[in-house]
Image: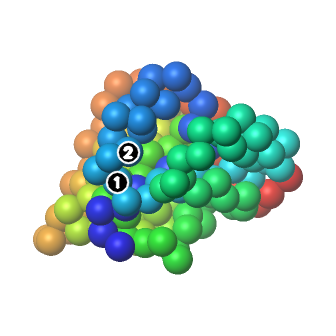
Amino acid sequence: MAGTTSSAACWKSAPAAAIRRRCSATWRARCTASNLKGLHDKARDNLRHFRVPNLHLLFGDGMVGFARGAPYAAIIAAAGGEDIPSAWVDQLAVGGRLVAPAVTVQGRQNLVVVDKTPTGLVRTELEAVHFVPLKSGIA
């Protein structure tokens, strides 16, 4: 299923929504996951009237991703942890890109881009950011 996209955590910002809308014609499917039941239900209710055919709202532990839809051409996270979960990297297609906040060796949170190439991973750390914490499990 290369060419599809997954968001490993629930999208929260207007700029992100604008990017998703612009890219939706080229993505066969978009998935968003939330581990907070209230947030998941509110997103479902808010998006229902748009009837977006290729948007899948998932309730569950975003740290494990969504293996059934993999591999993904892109994974974008709106929550950050100590490092990028290995499940996300495993579910990324060769040629795909993952963008997520992660803690650096200096102990601060940076926006990180991971490109999966035929020969391995290329990790690029960008500027400092402050995202909500990425938590395992569901609530």
Taking 78 as reference, is 91 left or right? left
Determine which of the numbered discs, if any, sits on residue 24 in the image: 2
Hey, what amino acid is under mark 1?
Trp
Residue 76 visible? The answer is yes
Q: Which residue is mark 1?
A: 27
What percent of the width, then of the height, locates residue 63?
Answer: 60, 59
Residue 56 vertical position relative to residue 113 in the rendered view, above or below:
below
What percent of the width, then of the height, locates residue 6?
Answer: 46, 56
Q: Quadrant of residue 81?
A: top right
Pick the front one: 7 or 19: 19
Q: Residue at x 67, y 39 (%)?
A: 49
Q: Residue at x 43, y 72 (%)?
A: 70
Residue 81 visible? The answer is no
Residue 30 vertical position relative to residue 11 in the rendered view, above or below:
below
Hey, what amino acid is under mark 2?
Ser
Pick the front one: 64 or 57: 57
Determine which of the numbered discs, if any, sits on residue 124 in the image: none
In the image as oriented, which residue stretches furthest toward the left?
Answer: 119
What percent of the width, then of the height, locates residue 116?
Answer: 24, 62
Query: Which class describes the residues within 10 Å of circle 2: few (<14), some (14-19), or many (20+)?
Result: some
